[in-house]
Image (tube, grey):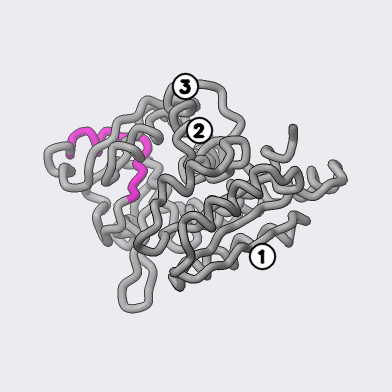
């Protein structure tokens, strides 16, 4: 088993952005909304802020308690849409009950939607249109697949299987793989048994379900690339979807949890922020 080390991939991305910011001479600025008291969200925002500042990017945090009105959030987003000093805007999820996630995200200007969640950006991406902003989570997964292929001189990587819980994620990942000329299909996690042959034949497996030990070594072929995008916390410990212990003596490439997709996602967010700044 070879680990696809997310922190190494993320560091390479961040070093590249840092050098480009220095060459550009102006600082991109990322605006982040943190609403409510979700502890995981606080940690994630802290990691984003540290990474941004480490590469010379400005970071503006808009912190609100769970009682904030939707109208006030929308008004602040509108102000930031008009602010030429703001390169990108994201809203940290999940949001407290009573706030309309889609309405708030879609209030962000598509040009400043550096997470790639805006309905207009998602539609353009899934229609195959050329997009300046590649949705962050799929972008991180693709970078990890490309890293595994390149680092290990792999050939004949033709088929990917995505294991997910929604059509939305499955469709956008299919399009992401299409952009690197890999055919992909998606299956829901509760249909794994009936799709076991498809899974066994995959050159790449992406899973994002939040179900511990969902995938084990008996379910995949030798030489497969597995990117584990699942995350769940049990008794204070973070787990992914993959039973990584079962792969220890197998010829496979697996991303760990933690230390896999997470750092790369942060790096891709900052890369998108840089790209949004470059007019």
| Residue highlighted by disc 3 | 128
> Does residue 20 appear to the left or right of 244 in the view shown?
right
Q: Is tag 3's residue or tag 1's residue first in the polypeptide sequence? A: 1
User: What is the quadrant of residue 239 in the picture?
Assistant: bottom left
Residue under the point 60% across and 46% down: 78
Image position, residue 100 (x, y; %): 39, 52
| Residue highlighted by disc 1 | 50
Question: Which of 86/140 is in front?
Answer: 86
Residue, far left: 194
Image position, residue 171 (x, y; %): 35, 32
Residue under the point 12% across and 38% down: 194
Question: Which of 101/98 is in front?
Answer: 98
Question: Which of 31/278 is in front?
Answer: 31
Q: Is residue 152 visible?
A: no
Please report the bounds of the magenta region as a residue range. 196-208
Residue under the point 66% across and 52% down: 30
Dot in front, 1 or 2: 2
User: What is the quadrant of residue 48 in the picture?
Assistant: bottom right
Image position, residue 255 (x, y; %): 44, 53
| Residue highlighted by disc 2 | 121
In the structure shown, which secondary structural element does the residue marked by tag 3 occupy? loop
Q: Is tag 3's residue or tag 2's residue first in the polypeptide sequence? A: 2
Real-space Cα distance between discs 3 and 1? 34 Å
Real-space Cα distance between discs 3 and 2? 11 Å
> Does residue 115 appear to the left or right of 17 in the view shown?
left
- Proximity of marks 1 and 2: CB atoms separated by less than 8 Å: no
- Proximity of marks 3 and 2: CB atoms separated by less than 8 Å: no
Q: Is residue 114 visible?
A: yes
Say few, some or many: other residues with alpha carbon within 10 Å of mark 2 (under 14 / 14 to 19 / 20 or more): many
Q: Is residue 95 above or below residue 254?
A: below
> Does residue 222 appear to the left or right of 176 in the view shown?
left
Image position, residue 174 (x, y; %): 38, 31
């Amino acid at each position: 088993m070879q680990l696809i080390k997310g922190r190494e991939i993320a560091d390479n991305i961040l070093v590249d952005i840092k050098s480009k910011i220095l060459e550009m001479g102006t600082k991109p600025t990322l605006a982040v909304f943190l609403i409510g008291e979700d502890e995981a969200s606080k940690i994630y925002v802290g990691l984003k802020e540290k990474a941004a500042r480490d590469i010379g990017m400005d970071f503006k945090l808009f912190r609100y308690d769970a009682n904030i009105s939707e109208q006030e959030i929308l008004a602040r987003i509108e102000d930031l849409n008009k602010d030429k000093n703001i390169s990108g805007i994201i809203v940290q999820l999940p949001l407290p009950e009573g706030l309309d996630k889609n309405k708030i995200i879609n209030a962000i200007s598509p040009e400043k939607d550096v997470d790639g969640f805006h309905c207009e950006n998602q539609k353009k991406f899934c229609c195959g249109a050329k997009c300046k902003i590649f949705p962050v989570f799929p972008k991180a997964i693709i970078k990890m697949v490309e890293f595994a292929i390149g680092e290990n001189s792999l050939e004949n990587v033709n088929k990917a299987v995505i294991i997910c819980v929604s059509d939305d994620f499955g469709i956008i990942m299919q399009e992401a793989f299409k952009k690197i000329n890999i055919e992909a299909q998606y299956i829901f996690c509760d249909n794994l048994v009936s799709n076991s042959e498809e899974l066994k034949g995959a050159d790449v497996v992406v899973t994002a379900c939040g179900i511990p030990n969902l995938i084990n070594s008996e379910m995949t072929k030798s030489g497969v690339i597995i990117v584990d995008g699942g995350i769940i916390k049990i008794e204070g410990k973070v787990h992914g979807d993959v039973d990584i212990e079962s792969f220890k003596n197998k010829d496979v490439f697996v991303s760990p949890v933690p230390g896999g997709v997470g750092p790369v996602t942060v790096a891709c967010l900052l890369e998108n922020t840089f790209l949004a700044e470059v007019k």
